[in-house]
Amino acid sequence: MAEPAYTVASDSETTGEEKSSSPFPEIAIGIDIGTSQCSIAFWNGSQVELMKNTRNQKMMRSYVTFKDEIPSGGVSNQLSHEHEMLSGAAIFNVKRLIGRVDTDPVVHASKSLPFLVQTLDIGVRPFIAALVNNVWRSTTPEEVLAIFLVELRAMAETQLKRPIRSAVLTIPVSFSRFQVTRIERACAMAGLHILRLMPEPTAVALLYAQQQQQTVHENMGSGSEKIALIFNMGAGYCDVAVTATAGGVSQIKALAGSAIGGEDLLQNMMHHLMPNSESLFSSHGMNEIKSMALLRVATQDAIHKLSSQNSVQINVDLGTGSKVSKMVTREEFEEVNRKIFEKCETIISQCLHDAKVDTEDLTDVILLGGCSYIPKVRDLVRGICKKEELYKGMNPLEAAVCGAALEGAVTSGISDPFGNLDLLTIQATPLGIGVRADGNNFVPIIPRNTTMPARRDLVFTTVRDNQTEALIIVYEGEGEKVEDNHLLGYFKITGIPPSPKGVPEINVCMDIDASNVLRVLVGVILPGSQHPAIPVMEVRLPTVDDGHGWCAEALHRAYGSTLALETVQKKI
Amino acid sequence: MRCSSYSYGLIIPGSDSRFFSLRTVYPFPYAKCPTRISVGSFKMKAKINDAAFVRQSTTQISFYELLGIPQTGTLPEIKQAYKQLARKYHPDVSPPDRVEEYTQRFIRVQEAYETLSDPGRRALYDRDLSKGLHLAFSARRRYQNDVDMEEKSEWKNRWQSQVSELKRRSMNKDSRGNMSWGARMRRQRDELSKEL
């Protein structure tokens, strides 16, 4: 079908570019689902605009309550009081639960939330439930997210007076491709088509590119390149990107991120105020949930105050006979969370290193997210980046969703007469993708921060004489050992012609296409042969589903190293 | 130029092109015996470069030709050329019907940019270029010395062909599914406006 088009490639200049005369293109909206808050933005024809709900809020709490028969989310629901959200009936922080198995430390940290997160610690999905009329009613993170997305969608449709089908969503940098499939699942449940999933700081990078384009008014491609570091720390995740921008093109040089955020600061602080709180709340009775909620609200409040004052007095009666009465200073808060702040510094340093950028090359440092109000966070970012002044042109809570809405307009093919949409983000892979080889090692084939779309391959060989089968186990992540990475899938190559070890060449090729779809192709050839020894395997990943946490272990138990691989040549 | 470069993706006339040279053929099934543009004639802009693409396999022109800059080009020139070509070939902005083809080009442009913007890799590349060798697709990174490389390049080439062919077929089967969303939307819209 597309074949004959190649013969007339000479007039390529005009084939695709003289369009945009169409009647009414659907413009994708931008959605930023945060761990604690979420927002929605759209391109209104000349600029990006944030939507407000019926209560005139731009930022809506990310939670769903199961109090009545019909669950309701933070978009439409009116909370009488903060405590109502913490009554056991509301599920929140799902962004930290989605796509994670019950051996994940992040899931374990969520067990102190005032609803049920139960773990069996065997690598299956955790059991999550809301307390409805003294009954634990089970749900899933996907379901909670979908209910929430349905509300967002309904709100957008009412205001824009048109059906909304497609959206650009932002995700944390550290999300694995498996977690991405869970987000896609939730969107599908909500009837939304995902046009793009953007790591949060890359959405911000696009907004930055547009702002630079507007201020400089330069011709396309000319003008100097600006390098910016974007640090975004919200309630659940900390993300960093280094971007090089010129002429509206934002090239992501490096990404780094981790599941640390305000939630960790809060939990450490709760632990500091009440060292036995975890054991106290583990039974999840009505009274315990109430106590937990009271402590949570008081601690959160104290942390907010410590951003503007040096000390704060906490007095809270937990109802069950225990009371917390304590004076906390800012130094104490910083000391209690020292490890978190150190981790932030590590992430920034790593990102700068990966981007091969020195601090003096940075034009701007952009600090965003709920945690950007914390003095310690501001200080550490300024310190590492050696910048006195932080970038001022963005709202710390709205930048990501605005970037997502911009991307929605750009990739929907909208053009703006003033050139405000002559933008492009060149994305990079946030995590490395590779296979298990050389024992228990993770050998990346597409390294982290590779520009997408991408295709890379690497040659492996057998580890035993007459090895006729090989197991290809695909992981995503940064750990040197496979167990430190996310499993994406596995399959077996069979029918390798018997030969001494090290002779068959097993070429593993990984391809990420324009739609960010990952495919792994494996071919086997014997030296001197003209043709591949067996048909090439082509596998679209991820293939794993929920409860995959035990798969790698099971594979290891069943096969050991009998079907293992080895790299052929040492990397330079 | 040495014959060895033929193993990097030229059509062997009369042979089953599916097996031997899809890297050459891939975007241009009708390309035959490309002629090499001489190194002196550049100062080409991206537009002219496009014509070069048509006549030639992308693997046969040098990275400098690909970016449309002289061999003496400075780092800012390389960056600028890269960003201009990215605006043209990146799947987010490329014309709907040519996404797969442009994706391949974008990957080549990316490779050229990554090589030439790194002083060390650029020096190595320049050395190879002066010997008449073009190393396509990360060959330099993979293989330590040239002997090793030539040995392996033959099968590697076949493998690449195999992979490209496979991919091409799987794409044709469901070409819409493989386009970026924007491209699909643009195509849909184009079709719509044609009907109107």
Image: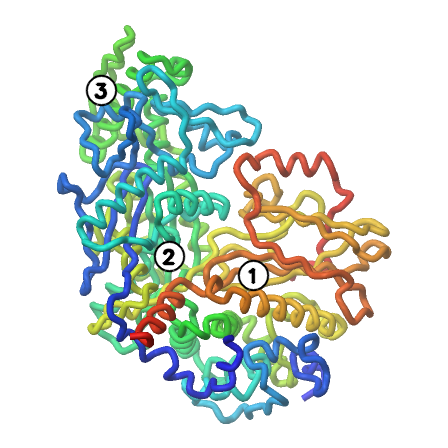
**Left or right, residue A406 beside residue B181:** left
Look at mark 3 in the image and give the residue it sits on.
A314
- Tell me whether circle 1 and circle 2 mark residues in contact (CB < 8 Å): no
Figure check: A472 above or below A314:
below
| Sequence-first disc among 1 and 3 | 3
Tell me the chain of label 1: A
- The kind of residue tagged 1 is Asp
Q: Quadrant of the C terminus of chain B?
A: bottom left
Q: Nearer the viewer, residue A335 or A391?
A: A391
Along the line of sight, the residue nearer the viewer: A568 or A503: A503
**Residue B21: horizontal and vertical position, in percent?**
66, 78
Residue at the top extreme of this rendering: A321
- Marks 1,3: beta carbons within 8 A: no
Labels 2 and 3: the sequence-earlier one: 2
- Disc 2 residue type (three-letter): Leu
Mark 1 vs mark 3: give the one in front: 1
Q: Chain of mark 3?
A: A
Label 1 and label 2 in one chain: yes
Which residue is pictured at 27% across the width and 47% down the height? A153
Which residue carries the number 2 mark? Answer: A195
Q: CA distance from mark 2 to mark 3?
A: 46 Å
**Residue type for callout 3:** Ile
Q: Is residue A370 left or right of residue B127?
A: left
Task: Name the residue rendered at 32%, 68% in the picture.
Answer: A413
Residue denoted by label 1: A511
